[in-house]
Image (cartoon, rainbow, N blue to C red):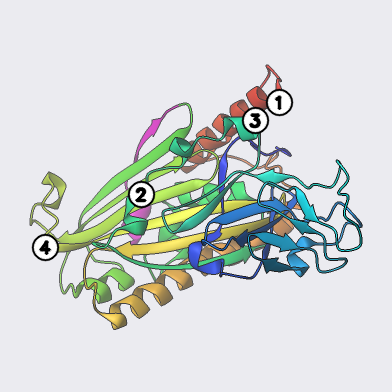
Amino acid sequence: MGAFLKNAWYAAMWSGELPDGAPEARRILDEPVVLFRDRDGAPAALEDRCCHRAAPLSLGRCVGDALECGYHGLQFDRAGKCIRIPVQDRIPDNAHVRSYPVIEKWNAVWVWMGDPAAADEALIPDYFWMDDPNWMVTCGTIRMKGNYQLLIDNLLDFTHVTYLHRDTIAGEEREGEAPVEVERTDNSVTVSRWLLDYDPPPLFARAGGFNGKVDRWQYTRWTAPSTLAFDVGCAAAGTGAPAGNRDQGISIWSTHLITPEDETHTQYHWAYVRNFGLDDPEMTRLLHDGAKATFMEDVVMIEAQQERLGGVSIEGCMDIAADGPPLQMRRIMDTLIAAESGDARP
């Protein structure tokens, strides 16, 4: 490890985190990026470093469709071209900053960090539920002091739920031994399992009002480089959920858009999206607070793990059977990064 996949979309922020008229700074793949909206509300992304004296453009202001440097007043359009210098009429040819392809989709602002000619909107995973009136979104962002792949490891490993999340989404202890099915493609890993006739986990018991045993499903798909979507939920045991009848239960899309700031810091954009109780603010509060508490349990552990590792390599650590999906993810990423860099040896 030690490199990032550049030719990919990364979620810079949730749409609601980018207001009109105010620039927002982010660090993505160890590069400073500033995002802002033009007069029509469309997002733009530029290098957060003025070409004049390297001042952060994020300390400036939006002026019409341009971003004005807060140090000497140079203005840049969404393509990164300087269009105004207050003290002179002539604008030098080298008065520009890098611009990044940017798309607002699925309630998030996505930035392409690699070759602009390779940017393809179709490569953004289909997370339709994030922008669908039949689903209610509750979301948040956590800045994590840990490598992004440690978080993906965590999310692809179902066994840790039993031990780390006892008070939130863990059910019976025997869940930790339930088998999973794993599928792999050139750029994805899917992990799934059914837990039939189990006690519901605390959060789901409160959300669904379950008083007895449930049949519980867990599916997740990681898509390179760093997004995951979980189809999770549970229904009253024996009511047909494994055959497709989920009417006696609750369904949630647990969505994770993971963006590396640098090798040891990560922006963790999470969302819990449901198709029940859409007009119930108490349900929204319950799931928001419960999801955040669950994900903070992960973050606390990963930050402690990162501190013990020191760097970003897991070499020297032993592997167990549950590490299969995370290890496949890491092999896929090694292959993609090597191919992008022209290195034939992943």
At a point 77% along the width and 69% down the height, the residue shown is 59
- Residue sitting at the far top: 344
- Between the residue at mark 2 and the residue at mark 4, the CA separation in whole angstroms equals 26 Å
The three-letter code of the residue at mark 1 reads Ser
- Residue 335, picture quadrant: top right
Q: Specify whether 326 is left or right of 53.
A: left
Work out whether mark 1 precedes mark 4 in sequence or the reverse, and give the earlier one: 4
Q: Is residue 336 above or below residue 110?
A: above
Question: What is the magenta range?
Answer: 171-185
Of the numbered discs in the image, which one, if any, rests on residue 248? Answer: 4
Q: Is residue 337 above or below residue 32?
A: above
Work out whether mark 2 precedes mark 1 in sequence or the reverse, and give the earlier one: 2
Q: Is residue 103 visible?
A: yes
Work out whether mark 3 precedes mark 4 in sequence or the reverse, and give the earlier one: 4
- Between the residue at mark 3 and the residue at mark 4, the CA separation in whole angstroms equals 44 Å
Q: From the image, tell me which residue sits under label 1.
A: 341
The three-letter code of the residue at mark 4 reads Gln
Q: Residues within 10 Å of mark 1 (few under 14, many from 20)?
A: few
Q: Residues within 10 Å of mark 2 (few under 14, many from 20)?
A: few
Q: Nearer the viewer, residue 251 or 279?
A: 279
Residue 280 at what x, y percent from top left? 25, 79
The three-letter code of the residue at mark 3 reads Ile
Q: Nearer the viewer, residue 31 or 308?
A: 31
Of the numbered discs in the image, which one, if any, rests on residue 337? Answer: 3
Q: Nearer the viewer, residue 32 or 39?
A: 39
Q: Are marks 3 and 1 in contact (CB under 8 Å)?
A: yes
